[in-house]
Image (tube, coloured by chain):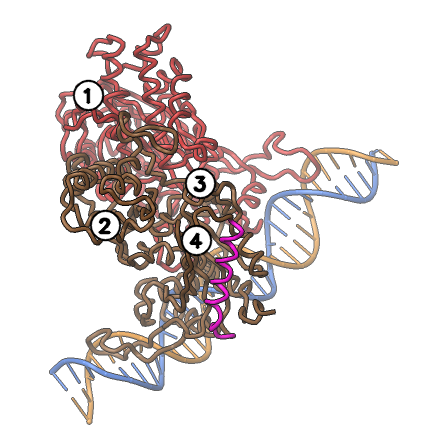
Chain colours: A brown, B red, C blue, D orange
Amino acid sequence: MSPQRRSGLGTNQEAIRRHNLGTVLRHVHSAGEMSRAELTAIMGLNRSTIAGLVGELESLGISERTTPVEGARQGAGRPSAGVRIAEDGPYVIAVDLGVDRAVVARVGLGGRILQRAQAPVHSDGEAWQVGAAVAALIRTVVADAPAASALVGIGISVPGLVRRNDGLIRLAPNLEWHDVSFGGIVLAALGLDVPVSLANDADLGALAEHTRGAGVGTDELIYISGNVGVGAGIITGGHRLEGAGGYAGEVGHLRFDPAGRPCHCGNRGCWETEVGAHAIAAAIQCPPDKVAQLDEVLDSFGKPSPALRATGTALGQGLASLVNMFNPQTVILGGYLRSLYLLVGAEVDAGLAERALPAPLESVTLALPGLGSDSSLLGAAEIALEPLFIDPVAALGTALEDVRSRLAG
Amino acid sequence: MSPQRRSGLGTNQEAIRRHNLGTVLRHVHSAGEMSRAELTAIMGLNRSTIAGLVGELESLGISERTTPVEGARQGAGRPSAGVRIAEDGPYVIAVDLGVDRAVVARVGLGGRILQRAQAPVHSDGEAWQVGAAVAALIRTVVADAPAASALVGIGISVPGLVRRNDGLIRLAPNLEWHDVSFGGIVLAALGLDVPVSLANDADLGALAEHTRGAGVGTDELIYISGNVGVGAGIITGGHRLEGAGGYAGEVGHLRFDPAGRPCHCGNRGCWETEVGAHAIAAAIQCPPDKVAQLDEVLDSFGKPSPALRATGTALGQGLASLVNMFNPQTVILGGYLRSLYLLVGAEVDAGLAERALPAPLESVTLALPGLGSDSSLLGAAEIALEPLFIDPVAALGTALEDVRSRLAG
DNA sequence: GTCGCTCCCGTGACTCGCACAACAAATTCC
DNA sequence: GGAATTTGTTGTGCGAGTCACGGGAGCGAC
């Protein structure tokens, strides 16, 4: 966390350097490639300071100098040299644990997916079995990593409640997991010791969309993930809203209609009983075994049925509660909700407009994910990369080099 | 905002001094009085650095040195000199605009109310009339201010939606105001030019309770203000959740029961139709003209009626949605909800337990305001003081000295 | 009562990070 | 082709925090 968040502490010169170095890297990471002149403008530091910071990143092997970017700017003056993420720079492993499959990717700075692999996951699988499968995918994915590149950490996206202190999976309903220390399981299966971060899939979707998706430039956004259950990842003030334990964003169990259908949480009429995957599947007579692929089912749908339109209205009305509560600038509909919105967008908009207060309504935009179905995966990469932006030197110090041979040995 | 919030910028040495000076002041402000040794421990800076910072605050006339605090610490060793807010230090004007009265106070650093005054406000009053009344109260309140003390700014708590960019009151339903620039009105009536900050009363209640009320030590709290309407102020990660426009926290219009009573917002079954002041007044046959004093009416209540108990359940059930969504550590019930909770706390707890998910439920505590009915007033003081914690030197530079004679002239 | 221990204050030298200024380099514009 | 513009590079200087030393103020034991 940067100075503001770890509020109360003082700042010394060491912290300044760390912070500035991390901030430069963060900018290069999110912009892909940029000129040193842009960096000086954005960060408000002196040319020579930026030169020093960039030089340090280069000597760390994180970034490399490029020839001036073509057509970056018109006008007179010496063109500014570019800064780009190095080819053999550090990378992370991102894991997106879905309800029916696991996706694993090796992701470099800049959010570039360097390699990916996936495998089906059985919903009744034990955690250690899933952990072994994920570990195998990780071995695949690091197989071609350059020996010079260092592994900074592993980020895992989980469809469930994750305790923020220690990353314990408190509950993953669709995997039927309770209190599973999945990070430890994966590390044990790999025989490695690297930092592992876990977080909720919707939270990570929000993070990724905020960094490089449909939420770029917004500091107030909500990402709703439709992924069997319905959850929300919330970014406010540019930061993830985690809550005391890390369980914030459980919007699926918002009270929607006290006279509604019973919910698996034990209550009645939760929002999820209207817009959850099982509810939608029932409404469109989709066989239960295809619920996990509801997005594809919906994509192949032709004309929306009245039941589906009612679902759209319910989605919009529920979103109105969120809009009233959070006053977001952007609401991103991920997972099957994306497909649903493509079908019944008008109803969703109408439901939202009907129920939201005028003031928050006027500034909100509904959007589709800019990263497709990779939002959570890239979000997992982001949390794993996070230490690099806090303190690049320290993060590289603990990073693991030549992981391939370590895994072989 | 401090370094983290204005993310993306670089930090230079000037910023570091500002930040550290502000942070020292913030600590002294919230602790009241503390020793330099404590400051070094909390801030993690060197003793000599703290000495320098404290010395600067003293030479600015903000703090003063005290003899070692009695019994602050047992054990051997030379006792550490204390730091305390100066007697003639800077102050702010806090205004709590209620639906039936306005409270104005002169508040010093440390949250000390130095002087206060109030006057009734007619709910059908024009904004300029209210502004004139508030200005008169301000004149009263600064009458005895020492000439050496400087006025840093004015903070105003508003029962309505306030746009965060410019402090425009977009809507204050109980005052029947639309798009009122109340800050400008008050300044014009005073003939002064000082910084004015406006914010929603619930947001400010949350802020004050977080700083020096029931939410000290918590960075995840929700303050629910029952004040004719129902609103929430949300602190997450130690910061106010404002939303894109500043309208976050409108929990009164959460969907509660689609088959419920019509709400003044045009919808049906908002939470406010169950737990709003008018709903409760109707449930206990309280005459409409006493709705603004509902807290007193409830306090004089003996045994809760079944209708009131049902309201308690509804309160708890609605809180469950908030708890699921935000995973707070503390939920503070302010305004008449405090009185309500004292009457039907069991029903509220039960409603919450029934509807909240286990994980967020286990870490949440319901609490009553630690500042009584002054939460919003002190919150207004806090936002007005905020510039001092960002940059004490700059804030004092723009502060107004000898306000009394300026107002006279 | 005195001594030692502990913790703190105050001062000066030191390190480190960024800003600034001057010069060189690379374009664009006229 | 020269002037203007913008950027990279280098060396100097300032400022902020750190560190080390000497001294002071209570506490506790003998």
- Check contact, mark 1 vs mark 4: CB within 8 A: no
- For label 3, the SS is helix
- For label 1, the SS is loop
Magenta span: predominant SS is helix
**Residue beneath label 4, please?**
A121
Q: CA distance from mark 2 to mark 4?
A: 22 Å
What amino acid is at disc 2?
Leu
Instruction: Give the mark nearest the N terminus, 1 or 3.
Output: 3
**Badge nearest the viewer, 3 or 4:** 4
Examine the image and state in which quarter residue B145 appears: top left
What amino acid is at disc 1?
Arg
Q: Nearer the viewer, residue B103 or A183?
A: A183
Examine the image and state in which quarter residue A328 appears: top left
**Residue beneath label 1, please?**
B261
**Residue visible at 19% across and 41% down?**
A308
Parent chain of label 3? B
Q: Position of residue B119 (x, y in %)?
A: 24, 19
Residue A345 visible (yes or no): yes
- Check contact, mark 2 vs mark 1: CB within 8 A: no
Label 4 crowding class (10 Å Cα cut-off): few <14, some 14-19, many 20+? Answer: some
A135 in magenta: yes
- Check contact, mark 2 vs mark 4: CB within 8 A: no
A172 w.r.t. A85: above or below? above
Label 3 crowding class (10 Å Cα cut-off): few <14, some 14-19, many 20+? Answer: many
B106 w.r.t. A236: above or below? above
Region rendered in magenta: A127-147
Q: Which mark is residue B26?
A: 3
Q: Which mark is residue A298?
A: 2
What amino acid is at disc 4?
Val
